[in-house]
Amino acid sequence: MALNPPPLKLYDSARLALDDIYKLAKGQGYAVSTFRSKTDKQVPPTMRGMWLWCAKGNDYNKTSRKRQTSSRITGCPFKLILTRTVIGWQVEVQDPTHNYQAFAHAGALPHY
């Protein structure tokens, strides 16, 4: 089963957009996490944009530990940007590909 990205859509708020993205990702069998966010220098600070990536999207850097450790990280290239525009919050997918199969149960991911 191919993992489909969220549709390109406008939202009234960032919270509504994130809830929709998380719900869609959970239904598809993957999880999305916040990589970075940017705020304006206004008072009070307001969110300008968010960069999201697959929850398995980092690269594993082996450390000099003596103990054996494991990781769920696969270096997944999936990325999307949530940007505030004049008319609302816009979702834009940068890279829609995943390098793993969908999870059968959402409980397999620690995000859920």
Image (cartoon, helix red, strand yellow):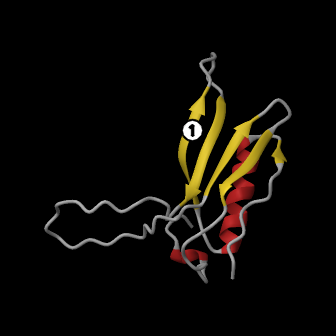
15 left or right of 87 in image: left
Q: At 52% from the left edge and 62% from the top edge, which residue is drawn?
A: 55
80 left or right of 10 in image: left
For this orientation, the residue located farthest to the left is: 66
Disc 1 crowd rating (10 Å Cα; few below 14, some 14-19, many 20+) is some
Give how far across and how far down residue 66 sits, in percent: 13, 68
The residue that disc 1 covers is 37
Q: At 69% from the left edge and 73% from the top edge, which residue is drawn?
A: 28
Give how far across and how far down residue 4 sits, in percent: 72, 69
> Regarding mark 1 in the picture, which secondary structure is present there?
strand
Quarter in which the C terminus is drawn: bottom right
Q: At 58% from the left edge and 80% from the top edge, which residue is drawn?
A: 101
Quarter in which the N terminus is drawn: bottom right
For this orientation, the residue located farthest to the top is: 43
Q: At 66% from the left edge and 69% from the top edge, which residue is drawn?
A: 26
Residue 19 vertical placement versus 99 (above, below)? above
Residue 100 vertical placement versus 56 (above, below)? below
Give, as a three-letter code, the residue at label 1. Ser
29 left or right of 99 in image: right
- Please name whichever residue, 30 or 58, is drawn nearer the observer in this view of the structure: 58
Give how far across and how far down residue 13 sits, in percent: 77, 40
- Please name whichever residue, 56 or 18, is drawn nearer the observer in this view of the structure: 56
Q: Quadrant of residue 69?
A: bottom left
Q: Quadrant of residue 71?
A: bottom left
- Please name whichever residue, 20 or 5, is drawn nearer the observer in this view of the structure: 5
